Image (cartoon, grey):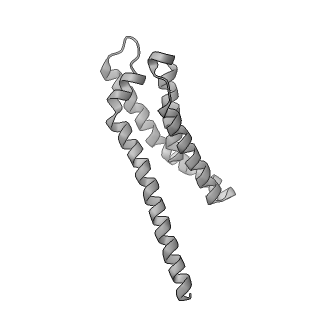
Amino acid sequence: MTAHSAVIDSRRSRQALLAGSVGNFIEWYEFGVYGFLATVIAANFFTLQGENAVTSLILAYAAFALAFFCRPIGAVIFGRIGDRIGRRPTLIVVVLLMTLTTALIGVMPTYASIGVAAPLLLTLLRMLQGLSA
């Protein structure tokens, strides 16, 4: 190993560490925001007719938890895909899936607009976020 290749390897390692750290920060930031805003999310998406605020909060946290339970499933699925088609294309797919689901959650109509479809769609999108995490 030459001195030049050692410098390049060191630079690539730092870039990979920085990129991984930024991605991890953004992911945990999103999970943190969901957790802190669970009462607002519960009021807008999970307040079903005839149910009280505690039930809607429990449903909001259940959707939150499903994202964590889907993470190992996503690791298995995307790990196998990465073995078959390569890491870079798989990473691109995962990042696009996370971006798309996050954007869709941001523009989703509330329960008052589309009824029971709102909590179902939000839960599905959270599960897709978990898969891509």
Q: How many labels, in total?
A: 0
**Which residue appears farthest toward the bottom when viewing the image?**
2
Residue 119 placed where, x, y %?
Answer: 47, 24
Residue 65 placed where, x, y %?
Answer: 41, 37
Residue 92 placed where, x, y %?
Answer: 60, 52
Q: Which residue is drawn at 48% across and 60% down?
A: 19
Q: Residue at x 50, y 48 (%)?
A: 133
Pick the quarter of the image with the N terminus: bottom right
Q: Which residue is drawn at 36% across and 43% down?
A: 32
69 or 56, nearer to the observer: 56
Q: Is residue 46 left or right of residue 72?
A: left
**Which residue appears farthest toward the right when viewing the image?**
85
**Which residue appears farthest toward the top when viewing the image?**
50
Q: Is residue 61 left or right of residue 78?
A: left
Residue 91 visible somewhere in the drawing: yes
Q: Is residue 81 left or right of residue 113?
A: right
- Is residue 101 positioned above or below 81 on the image? above
Residue 115 visible somewhere in the drawing: no
- Is residue 19 positioned above or below 71 on the image? below
Residue 102 placed where, x, y %?
Answer: 50, 39
**Which residue appears farthest toward the front when viewing the image?**
107
Q: Residue at x 41, y 36 (%)?
A: 64
Residue 4 is drawn in which quadrant?
bottom right
